[in-house]
Amino acid sequence: MTEILSKEALLLSILAAPAVLFLLFSCLWLLGWTPHERVMANTTRVSYMLMVAASLWLFLGGERRILVSMGDWFQAGEYRFPLVLFADRLSLPLIALTAALVGLVGAFSVRYLHREEGFFRFFVLLHLFAFGALLIFAAGSYDLLTAGWELVGITSVLLIGFFSERRGPVLNAIRVFAMYRISDLGLLLVLFVFHNNAGSAVFSSLYTGEWPNQTTTLPPGIALLAGALILLAAAGKSALIPFSGWLPRAMEGPTPSSAIFYGAISVHAGAYLLLRGAPLLATSVWLSAVVVVVGGFTAVLASMTQRVSADAKTGLAYASMTQVAIVVVETGMGWYTLALFHLCGHAVLRTLQFLRAPSMLHDYHRVHAAAGGHLARSGEAFHLVPDHLKVWLFRYASEFGFYDQLIDRFVTSPVTRASEWLASFEPGQRPRVSETAKPGEPGGRIIAQAAGHTAREAD
Amino acid sequence: MEASIWLVGFVVGVPCGAAALALTRRPGSPRVLGGWAAAIALAASLTMVGVTNLDFSSFAMSLFSLLALTTILLAPQRDLVGTRMPGLLLILGGTLAAYSATSLAGIFAGWTLSSLPHVLRWFSAPGPGPKSWAPQVALGASSVCLALGAAVMTWMPAAEGLGALRGFTLLILAALLRKGIFPFHSWVARAHEDGTPGAAALLLNGHLGALLTIRFIIPMLGEASRQALPLLNDLALFTAVYVALLALVEKKPRRILAFLSVSQASFILAGLENTSQTGITGALAYWPVVALAITGMVAVYSAIEARYQGTDAPRDLLGIGARTPRLAVFFAASGLALAGLPGTLGFVAEDLLFHGALESDPLLGVALPLATALNAITIFRLFSTLFLGKRVNQVPPMPDALARERWPLTAVTAGLVITGIAPGLVIRAVSPLAEGISRLLTD
């Protein structure tokens, strides 16, 4: 009994539960059985309640450090992939938060998606996401963290394209997937840096001490390189500049998935990565400064854009981006504990706001009418800004600093043109493939087309 | 040992005999004949796994028999008529013969036999449309190069000096032609476009070019290999990125699948040519990933091609997944495994490949993630184009995965996932060979 309730067994159970649910329901579906909505709802409720109880037991039980070593997943030559789970003061609150918020969103979705065509698909993907997110927070090595990272990415993309009968969500999902894959290169490359220099990517071989007072064992130059690559990966997942353009597109998914991905957990994964890699950032004042600048600039721009957003969910997305960017600034400044508190508080608040979004406008109109149309106006301070500057600022903010256009012009377009030029040498291939391309066809500039289709346009 | 020889003869003989029977008698149900021949070959290969205690040959033979069985069971009826079923069986028999070969003459026989159906255009689509000669020329040239290389190596067994260089050049040329490494990649796209994609994928998934390299070129020409393989490594890397870029803007699904297949298969050759045991193990473990994933994707594409007119060069999102959700899931699962999704063998193999690459060639460690990222984008784009973007009532009625299709596709998906969660079996099968190659390249 003691062994069953040991902290290691509890951590393992929390991690395994959503994976088991995902595999079970997927296999049953592939074999031809689609579970009833009530079955999905009840299993989700019971599982996540148990997970929340277990994670609170660990979190409130005063555990500071849980290490679960399960040997090597696989090995070849001198290389080993260790299966190490690790929970400390940084990851325990996030594990508890993930279990609680995914369970909450699951409970909300039972009614919200009732009789929706993709009800089953949503829940299966939610379990896969929960497993990926928990793997990120409970991983004891960057190798394992990468596995969770990629699972979160793919479930995010599949849920953006949830309403697959419309072309907007599909094109946006392609765009987001491309952004994720490019920024994830940072995480893949940092694995090489760790293995090459420390012989391992296990946290205990890279960092000494206890979070938040850890130091790295890597030489300063290598730590700087690793920190820069981690910032690249974090920027992609947390929608920092220059990868910010994907976040409003992600609002195409159903509201509960927007809440859990872009309000609560997924968007904070980048901030967690930076907090976990804090000892690397601390070795270089320049790298810390870059983190602060990237976070600060994202926060200002997202805040401006949020003020000119025309719909509630996009506004919330930019508000979310603002707060995540401030968490990143706090990390860059070395205020790690504050950043963790901010992250957790923001995740909870934003989940509430996202889940309330569908009924919020209705409530606003009701309150507005009850107040006789005299609710306090906002934005009065902008009257001080000259008119021509106001127009320019509005344009700049509504286009989010033209970052998407810059990426299209200087990255997507050159790569597409180069590929088309290479393709023109292929036997039997007409030159300039995209000349005949129409939106949505494979070939041509589908990613660029996706760029032109924002969530606002879809709304 | 004698039992093994008889077993090999049986494994190779059954599909070849069935092909001969299908050519002379024209059976009423070619799928039944081909399916049984492939199933018997699979059962006998699995018996060999037990007899040989899981050596690489028996593992590769079992895998290829499974691929052939899957291809035959999943192929639309139109892809099995006339000379097409005997062609698939000849590819199976020839490839199994090549896997079991212990001499250059043996691999030449299997190599040529498996190329024969494509050289004779047994899979060409009927009709007056223009057909490319590229597959015939490339496969024919690869057989000629292999024959000449084998002749040089036979006449100059000492394998030194100019003779060794000539032999090495010819054998490597044969491998490059067969695997579709740049600048010989175009024939693969044409084979997929002009013939049946299932047959082209089966031919390519034999990976006989890689087999020739690990079985004969490196052991017989160790010194030349040590000198020249870094160059070939770079060529394979270039192919991976170059063909991934071609796939990024391609609009015909058949050509996209061909390019994905060439780009990802280049990883195998690139990995084999670095000196670390980790990287070579990764390359050999990537072999079944490419084989299973491409077979799954091509099979699903062929299935929807047979159900829906207009998939050859779609000008809009087709939304077929609204009618065929299970086929869509099978396609996505295979594609994501190819892109290295965690929980599939693709993740394990890529992890080993990338880490091994770092030990010997940092360029490989950068180029491979880049090519994988580009291919992942292409896979998701193709998936979206074929399966997403329309309501059910906007797509003509068509059946989802039939029972005949569902079980083999489940087997492919399960194979990729189970070996991804517990990769020990695959790694155990390829490790001794990887260790041997690594020793040959470093000693």
Image (tube, helix red, strand yellow):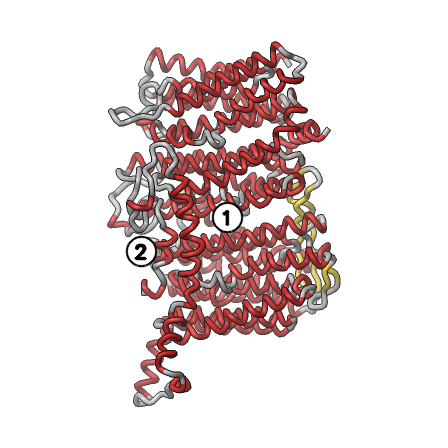
Residue A289, by quadrant, is bottom right
Q: Position of residue B236 (x, y in %)?
A: 54, 34
Q: Secondary structure at mark 2?
A: loop
Image height check: is B188 above or below A247? above
Disc 2: CA contacts within 10 A as few (<14), some (14-19) or many (>=20): some
Pointer 1 residue: A23
Residue B402, by quadrant, is top left
Q: Are marks 2 and 1 in contact (CB under 8 Å)?
A: no
Image height check: is B441 above or below A366? above
Q: How many marks?
A: 2
Q: Residue at x 56, y 62 (%)?
A: A270
| Subunit of label 2 | A
Pointer 2 residue: A166
Amino acid of disc 1: Leu
Q: Is residue A287 left or right of residue A426?
A: right
* Any part of residue A256 in sight: yes
Front residue of B353/B270: it is B270
Front residue of B260/A373: it is B260
Label 2 in the same subunit as label 1:
yes
Disc 2 from disc 1: Cα separation:
28 Å
Q: Residue at x 49, y 41 (%)?
A: B241
